[in-house]
Amino acid sequence: GNPDYRDSGLTFPDGFLFGSATASYQIEGAYDEDGRGPSIWDTFSHTPGKVWNGDTGDVADDHYHRWESDLDLMVELGLESYRFSIAWPRIQPTGRGPAVQAGLDFYSNLVDGLIARGITPIATLYHWDLPQALEDEGGWTVRSTAEAFADYARLVGAALGDRVAVWTTLNEPWCSAYLGYGSGAHAPGVTSPLAALQAVHHLNLAHGLAIQALREVVTNDPQYSITLNLHVLRGSGDQGAEAVRRIDAIANRAFTGPLLHGAYPPDLFTDTASITDWSFVESGDLEIINQPLDVLGVNYYSTTLVAVWDGVSPRQMADGHKDAGGSPWPGADDIEFLPQPGPYTEMGWNIDPSGLEELLLALHAEFPAQPLMITENGAAFADSPTRDADGAARVHDPLRVDYLQRHFTAAHRALSAGVDLRGYQVWSLMDNFEWGYGYSKRFGIIRVDYDTQERTLKDSALWYATLIASRTIPAA
Ligand code: PNW
């Protein structure tokens, strides 16, 4: 029990899945090949001023053409699982209609390649690349998008549902709703508190409908899941507890409530009453959303410090979000987001492994029977390539190694306390398109040279390979 979490020598149980994660738009490129339709991220990244440096996912890591050699890198690391996402517009270019065979084939080959290498496939159906044609009809603000998502899930489930081990419906609906339709920092770049709350519900509904559709077509008894980026909140000042309650309602319980308790929290309705009466929640929706989850995916990077604003001094908004004009916190204009003590990653996010332990323990306390999986954790740092004396290409990234060591220690502490934690997918397998930050932030444990597409295992990748091979946390 080292209070700074720099422990080594801790061993993980057999069956605990050591893996890594990516997402389609962030790595694939080939944005107009084999019948792929445009997604909201193509539109957004091609709109001047939306993404740092005008970067786009047109080429990204060119993984669409390099997937086989990328699989071989996974073998070098000894990965036991790989979490990837499926690009909806490769399957249905307009979000509706029959499946494009070439799109299904790409993911089918990927899944076969994983299984042939002994790597468990964890497939996410939606990591933010909504077909643009559906956005043109209202996107996540309208119910018909949730219904279309179920049809898409059925097509993918029918094609891959004999081999995928874990199905994740949505990645981080918080980001889709509040950054996509509230702050506007993410595609489609809408800045409307009402639209954000409509999106929350239609994303929740899409999850439930998709699980129902998958259950109808899969044949291999997979696990069903969703991945949430729950906020680990700390309060400051006299009304710290009230500030935490407010942000917990909108950021966390707006999802865990319907998903795991079968109801939206009443305080969410009262907190947002000036924006909407939530009449878009129809009778029967909560039963659809409240599906048993075989595993709940947890993404964790940092903590959040909140206070009730005094209304007089300048309101602090050090929340680590790109300022894109709107607020990601509908109905919370009286809440401040305070700066936190460092150290920080290159994103400006504070490093605090105790938050991961706290989150896992809190989830276990609230949902004791719920298995959990860390579906993302990792860090962006501005590491750079060097050559060793023998000429070998190296990337020394001691800050990322330290970050991972401390967060694996936090996860191990939660396991030891009785949390049913099933695995850990490091974000990310390789440097990639970091959304509004383009290629300026590198989360990979493998470096990508964007001029040559050359891949180099960073020291963190070698460290992770040692952890996986020994199942024991090495010294950083
Ligand atoms: C997650 N925020 O995104 C995503 O699932 C990944 O695709 C992404 O690359 C990774 O975390 C690192 O950012 C987030 O502003 C994006 O709070 C933004 C936020 C959180 C998560």
Image (cartoon, rainbow, N blue to C red):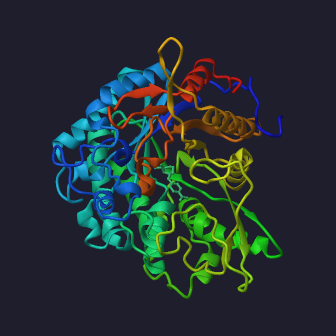
> The N terminus lies in which quarter of the figure?
top right
Q: Residue at x 49, y 35 (%)?
A: 20
Q: Residue furthest top?
A: 390
Where residue 407 appears, x then y in whole percent? 67, 39
275, 329: nearer the viewer: 329
Query: The C terminus lies in which quarter of the figure?
Result: top right
Residue 171 appears at what percent x and percent y?
46, 52
Comparing 344 with 105, the one in front is 344
Residue, x 34% and y 32% (percent of image)? Answer: 453
Residue at image coords 59%, 60%: 320
Residue at 52% x, 74% y is: 327
Numbered marks: total: 0
> Going by the picture, which residue comes out furthest to the front?
389
Relative to the observer, which residue lies in front, 349 or 265?
349
Q: Is residue 45 above or below residue 354?
A: below
Residue 288 in view (yes/no): no
